[in-house]
Image: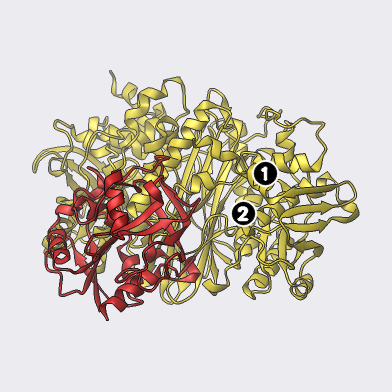
Chain colours: A yellow, B red
Amino acid sequence: MRTVDRALALGLTEAEFQLICEKLGREPNEVELAVFSLMWSEHCAYKHSKRLLRQLPSEGPRLAMGPGENAGAVTVGDGYVLAFKVESHNHPSAVEPFQGAATGVGGILRDIFAIGARPIAVLDSLRFGEPTSARTRYLLDHAVGGIGHYGNSIGVPTIGGEVYFEGPYEQNCLVNAMALGIAREDGLIRSAATGVGNALILFGASTGRDGIGGASVLASAELGEQDASKRPTVQVGDPFAEKKLLECSLELLDLGLLVALQDLGAAGLSSSSAEMASKGEVGLDIDVSLVPLREAGMAPWEIMISESQERMLCVTDPDTVERVLAVCAKWEVHGVVIGSVIEERVLRVLDGPDKVVGEMAVQALVDDCPLYDLAPAPPEAGLYPAPVATLDASESDPRAILLALLAAPNIASRRPLFEQYDCIVQSRTVRRPEQADAAVLALPGGGAIAVSIDGSGRRVACDPYTGAIEAVLECTANLACTGAEPLGLTNCLNFGNPEKPHIAWQLTEAIRGLADACRALDVPVVGGNVSLYNESGGGPIYPTPVVGMVGELPSAAAAGRSGFVRAGDLVALAGPFVPALPASELAKLRGEQLPDGLREIDVAVLRAAQEAIRDAVRAADLSSAHDVAEGGLLVAVAESCLAGGLGATLDLGAAADERMMFGESPGSGFVVSGPEEALRRLGESVAVQLLGTVGGDALDVRGADARLSVTLGELREAHAALAALFP
Amino acid sequence: MKLGVITVPGTCDDADARLAVSKVAEPVALWHGESDLQGVDGIVVPGGFSYGDYLRAGAIARFSPVMESVIRFSQQGGLVLGICNGFQVLCEAGLLPGALLPNAGLRFRCLQVQLEVVGAQMPFTGDCAAGERLSIPVKHTTGRYYAPPADLESLDAHGQIVLKYAPGHNPNGSVDDIAGVRNRAGNVFGLMPHPEHAVDPLTGSDDGLKIFLSMAHAHG
């Protein structure tokens, strides 16, 4: 086979191959071609998204570490910083859901401790096809199992997340994992290799043939029929090995023994070493014959690109090598000097002390991959078929609609999923799943942070620009309900093939929406991840920008909750809530075609409303606060009833039509409860409509078009619909 | 009082256990590779996945140097509390009767449960009243308590069943709703629920503190 044909088979274009030859001054050998094909893959080089991503604002007064490092970080007071990042593991999970999801968690956790932060929480954002499909149930069950297996075993709580079920994810599910870590401000470490003559140490698990070519073959191409054969490109996770790696890494940092630290993720040793050298403006010698192997007879190129999990690289002074290796021995992880920092800015791969098997300029690997401008064009017709109707279009009884919505896969209780995750280890969890709109963790010193992750692909499919803004506002609304002020945002952009004009348009519009929303809210983007080529024979996924956000509360004790607390409290709808039925969950249940466009949003108006809610929660004025999301107002009230175990009696007045009861307008409406005086005060800064009173064991609603009564038991039964998926 | 908290590779709840202990006594971190118990007055074997739990939950940890010392310590009457994986380790070590099997649903479950105090006696539940309910979380895959019928009768007869899941709260299919048992001598106690995760109302409940307070009061 000609070298150029091998390059094409590895996912490079002919022009890219020619450029590589130009940079090297010759054709690449086997090792070099393997390394380049990965470093220049979409997954590593962001060649179709890098230019667009420059629009995202990444500056802010609380920023401690911005995009470019393994994870971003913001300051949270008392000398602490909070590191966080979200990342996708979509294609591995579509091919092998348990290990795909597990190693997704493992990978994002390594990103956190690679900058010196102790991981304190995981959240997940999942997308599957409709649960009526056997494939969806298999993927869901195994992905949830994999997430739990890894997070539970390593002792990091999984405190939140979200899952949506929509037809376009049937073949190409999404598994995004977000992790958070805490560190002292002066304890962060960067990945830049520095100090010519310093030693390069590989530590952690041994290196095998697992995950060879994962980033190029699997992550940077559309899914197809033969994907079962790609199973060997999925890595296998070992949380016990990572637990030791984590403790070992943090102990090495505590002892001040490291110059630089980097985890091995996509493209393994190639990418981690090239990145370290690039950031440090140095070169590296790596002798692959020194790498501890899991199986005999691995070729140098395989060692360079293996994606075996649970491995780290560090740089240390020659004088401290012995101490580093001693700490590795204590934690029973392999620690081996595999190379050194050199002045010449090349990545030189050796197989034994004198045998050079590859030599590539660091800049060529990291910076010279061509970046592509997209050719966006809006689709001429709708890209997605109408959802399959599950509710008779003629059904107009609000009681029946409410129960159908509560049982809908996108709304039903996530308890059968989150009960499989340890949400309390590390003793920080102040609000667990279903106790508040965002998870709340206590910080040393009495403060707290709230975390939320959101992104409704169906709404982004209707209108990529506005849908992306809504995803950000949904996150800030969730934070506001706990009393938290946003500090920073991470995002994972899950899209189809960007070489197609309509996908390029979705991506371009969504990034523009994210950028505008972040600017209008003064929330910096601290980092993120892009996952493209999420397509299969069934077409592209819904464009799915997943937004993860961290906010700050002055006091853990005053964290808000979503459930009603006290019989006798008044219930109100707060905010500039103007609901709409198109693109709503009810429209989906009725099988309605996605609308072309969403109503325009005035972010400044919503920001002011959310800040009013936040201040009222912080002042401990309100007993509960819950944002009106999928399913609209009555679903939100029912959720507050269920979370608090208390009924409510509401009078919606003359305007109580279907649009009012079940229409949606993300981030703009809040169901709040509290004493009359508190709601009056809230009304001074935001529109407040009194709806009724908390109490009893049923939800009773009166209004112009409606009169319904549902017991808590009936609400609970409908809401428990997902339990059937986990027999 | 000094309470040692054991860490083996794969322990996850050691920091939580030290935090809980610190509310009633002085916590001492004990490392698996060292057999010196540093003069502690009692031991907590915390939860997690010791050595990855790869052979069988708790089966490897039982052979660590520190556990050899803990076994001797318990034989001399020292107080030993095993929580979750710690309970599994103590059963594997033969310090407690019975065994922990995979949950009835075969899945990991994390939820707050109600427990009933069956035996309110020193040294682990002296601060509780008989029949008192405690709100404490569970989180495990392998927590279904099992002992043969004859052994169960003997446990009952000797007052070794200390905690039961309240009716409707058994999360794993444990026989007779058993959540925690002690040895015949009464100085070794194991339970699947996590009292160290119930020591502060801010994070859910402080009912679990009574277990640690009981140990402190028993020590005097």
Q: Is residue B56 left or right of residue A53?
A: left
Measure the alpha-carbon separation of dots 2 and 1: 24 Å
Which residue, given by chain and number where applicable, does mark 1 sit on? A406
| Label 1 Cα crowd, 10 Å radius (few <14 / some 14-19 / many 20+) | many
Q: Nearer the viewer, residue B72 or A319?
A: B72
Mark in front: 2 vs 1? 1
Q: Position of residue A655 (x, y in %)?
A: 88, 52
Instruction: Count all numbered tags in the image, as a single digit.
Output: 2
Q: Position of residue B30 (x, y in %)?
A: 20, 67
Give whichever of discs 2 and 1 has the lower sequence position: 1
Q: Is residue A177 above or below residue A378?
A: below
Residue A472 circle label: 2
| Residue A340 visible in the current orientation | no
Please identify the residue farthest to the top as the structure is shown.
Answer: A1
The residue positioned 17% from the left and 34% from the top of the image is A295
The residue positioned 79% from the left and 65% from the top of the image is A688
Q: Quadrant of residue A553?
A: bottom right
Tell me the subunit letter for badge 2: A
| Label 2 Cα crowd, 10 Å radius (few <14 / some 14-19 / many 20+) | many
Callout 1 secondary element? helix
| Residue A419 visible in the current orientation | yes
Please identify the residue farthest to the bottom as the structure is shown.
Answer: B220
Q: Is residue A635 left or right of residue A447?
A: right
Callout 2 secondary element? helix
> Label 2 is placed on what type of residue?
Val
The residue positioned 72% from the left and 30% from the top of the image is A591
> Label 1 is placed on what type of residue?
Leu
Q: Nearer the viewer, residue B172 or A390?
A: B172
The residue positioned 70% from the left and 30% from the top of the image is A390
Tell me the subunit letter for badge 1: A
